[in-house]
Image (cartoon, helix red, strand yellow):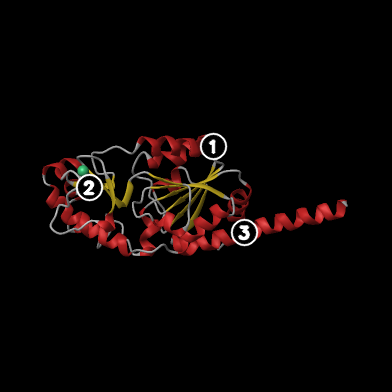
């Protein structure tokens, strides 16, 4: 599947770009057993997200919201990074990928070894006290009875994730805009590009001349609008292939440079 001229162009661009930014969404973690909440069999069939994960209803009735949150945290706690996560970490270690902007809250990019991760929606591995803003690792708190309370001040604890009705953390938003405006390639993985502000990032990059490469199991809202190269398939299968191709391209470049310098001697 990596034989077409278009894909070769993408691999070359990724291998030789000064800056590559990756944008990931729910599809990235499906291979780790975290089903998209909106999909079939998702938690959303059991709970109304606008209700259970909205900041208003959390403030009104934290015990009820925690019923759903507990289930999410348990799924996430068991999840391990998949080959897609490891491939992105490898590309970062090779100096190819600059940053990963993610809409996921599972912390699997960091667990796989990615260093420069910008989290749009926070991270479920921490909880924060609504009273004194103290933070705790989620694994350190008892989830019975619900809701959990802060041992310091007795305030209600909330997962450190962005709820409906809350805004994206300012630092994450600013940092992602810097990354997006400086990169030559945006690799979009496992996100349908329906929800702003993440949805508008590839478009901003494209206006500045970046190439948009999309990896998704099916064509998305983004495919016809901004995508230059569409790779159809699951990220845990395609990203390892892509990382290998990039590595081969870079190795070829290194050995031809070596040849040139030894000829010059
Ligand atoms: Zn507190």
Percent of width and height locating residue 155? 17, 44
Q: Considering only order in the chain, which callout, 2 or 1, is on the residue closer to the N terminus?
A: 2
- For residue 7, side relative to residue 60 (left or right): right
The reply to whether callout 1 and callout 3 are in contact (CB within 8 Å) is: no
Instruction: Give the distance between the C-alpha atoms of the residues marked 3 and 2, in whole angstroms.
Output: 42 Å
Closer to the observer: label 3 or label 2?
2
- Where 82 falls versus 134 (above or below)? below
Residue 161 seen in the current view: yes
The residue nearer to you, when weighing 113 against 133, is 133
Mark 1 — residue? 182
Reading the image, the residue beneath label 2 is 158
Residue at horizontal 62%, vertical 59%?
A: 247
Residue at x 38% of width, y 57% of height = 27
Residue 233 visible in the displayed image: no
Quadrant field for ligand 1: top left
Quick one: SS at disc 2? strand
Q: Is residue 226 left or right of residue 19?
A: left
Regarding mark 3 in the picture, which secondary structure is present there?
helix
Label 2 crowd bin: few (<14), some (14–19), many (20+), radius 10 Å: many
Alpha carbons under labels 1 and 2: distance apart: 35 Å
- The residue under the point 31% across, 57% down is 36
Q: Which of pointers 1 and 2 indicates the residue nearer the eye? A: 2
Q: Gap between marks 1 and 3, in whole Å? A: 23 Å
């Amino acid at each position: 599947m990596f034989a077409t001229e278009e894909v070769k162009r993408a691999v070359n661009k990724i291998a030789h770009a000064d800056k590559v930014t990756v944008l990931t969404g729910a599809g990235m973690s499906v291979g780790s057993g975290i089903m998209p909440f909106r999909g079939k069999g998702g938690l959303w069939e059991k709970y109304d997200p606008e209700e259970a994960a909205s900041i208003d209803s959390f403030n009104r009735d934290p015990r009820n919201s925690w019923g759903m949150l507990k289930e999410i945290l348990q799924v996430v706690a068991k999840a391990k990074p998949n080959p897609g996560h490891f491939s992105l970490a490898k590309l970062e270690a090779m100096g190819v990928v600059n940053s990963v902007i993610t809409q996921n809250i599972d912390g699997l990019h960091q667990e796989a070894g990615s260093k420069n991760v910008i989290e749009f929606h926070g991270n479920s591995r921490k909880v924060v006290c609504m009273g004194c803003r103290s933070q705790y690792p989620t694994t350190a708190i008892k989830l019975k009875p619900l809701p959990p309370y802060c041992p310091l001040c007795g305030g209600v604890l909330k997962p450190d994730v962005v709820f409906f009705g809350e805004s994206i953390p300012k630092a994450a938003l600013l940092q992602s805009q810097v990354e997006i405006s400086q990169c030559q390639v945006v690799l979009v993985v496992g996100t349908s590009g329906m929800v702003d502000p993440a949805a508008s990032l590839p478009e901003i990059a494209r206006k500045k001349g970046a190439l948009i490469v999309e990896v998704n199991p099916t064509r998305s809202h983004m495919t016809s609008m901004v995508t230059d190269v569409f790779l159809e398939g699951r990220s845990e299968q395609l990203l390892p292939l892509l990382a290998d191709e990039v590595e081969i391209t870079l190795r070829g470049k290194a050995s031809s440079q070596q040849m040139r310098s030894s000829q010059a001697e």
